[in-house]
Image: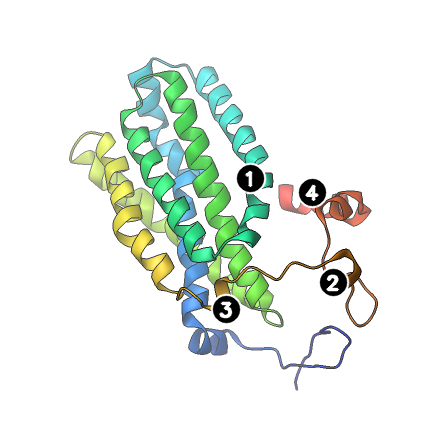
Amino acid sequence: LQIGFRVGSLQAMKPLRTYWELLRTQPRYIFYGYVHFFFSSLGQTFLLGIFKPYWLESLALSNQQFGNYYAAATVASATLLSWLGSQIDRFRLRNVSITNGALMLLFCAGAAYAAHPWLLVGVLFGLRLTGQGMMILIGATGVARYFVTARGKALSLASLGLPAGEALLPPLLIATMSWGAWQNGWLVLGGLVGLVFMPLAPGLISRHDPFQQPPAPKSEAARTDASGEDASYTRGQVLRDPLFYLLLPVALF
């Protein structure tokens, strides 16, 4: 039994790939997304929360002050992410990965040596943006726009990088910090970014690999497919679509 998806004008019906087929035929592309989901952990609340007691003590902050700083950094990073997301379609993915990894490496160093509350706000902003925001966006965008008929399966495999990070990084950090200063935890994380992510992520795709090519820009006249339906939505069209606001609560929860 073969299950097909509607592609364009229904002229092409492709069988739905299995998870094994995806891993066997396109392992580099799946792992590219996986690596980004894994390293998004550095900006996720579960990991940043490990360092909260140390920041409170070293900077003489209250829980309320830290919560306010964290909220401000999160909202600011999310606001900027709405613009940065559109830039991913303009540049090669490997270049975006390298740039984001380099910025994350700097913020890891800043997290270890932030000596003032406002420096901590900047560090939290950077880690939330490059980690929880951009890492997931880069990995998900690359996988989603390359895999068409098996998009759900490909994304589900790539997204396993996040629970892997949740399982592996906290024990690693706790073990590292129990043997020395808490700042060593951030030095280890920065080392992982510099020694593992930055060579690995761009190394999975070649310079001219079609996987990481931005889609060709479409004119307004060419924005429909053979069936007469919209082939690509502009940001304005999305914001005016009532369905978008019905989908938001799903993402929120």
* Residue 205 found in image quarter: bottom left
Tell me the crowding category of disc 3: few under 14, some 14 to 19, or many 20 or more residues within 10 angstroms, Cα based: few
Residues at marks 3 and 1, CA–CA distance in whole angstroms:
25 Å
In the displayed structure, 68 sits above or below 21; it is above
Can you tell which mark lies on residue 231? 2
Tell me the crowding category of disc 4: few under 14, some 14 to 19, or many 20 or more residues within 10 angstroms, Cα based: few
Instruction: Tell me what residue is drawn at x 55 percent, y 42 percent.
Output: 84
- Please, what secondary structure does the residue beneath circle 1 have? helix
Upstream in sequence: badge 3 or badge 1: 1
Can you tell which mark lies on residue 249? 4
Tell me the crowding category of disc 2: few under 14, some 14 to 19, or many 20 or more residues within 10 angstroms, Cα based: few
Instruction: Tell me what residue is drawn at x 69 percent, y 44 percent.
Output: 248
- Residue 237's spot in the image, x, y percent? 77, 48
Upstream in sequence: badge 1 or badge 4: 1
- Residue 215's spot in the image, x, y percent? 60, 61
The residue at which mark 1 appears reads as 81
- Residue 247's spot in the image, x, y percent? 72, 48
In the displayed structure, 39 sits above or below 107; it is below
Residues at marks 2 and 3, CA–CA distance in whole angstroms:
20 Å
Residues at marks 1 and 4 touching, judged by CB atoms closer than 8 Å: no
Upstream in sequence: badge 2 or badge 4: 2
- Give the residue type at disc 1: Leu
User: In the image, is 250 to the left or to the right of 106?
Assistant: right
The residue at which mark 3 appears reads as 210
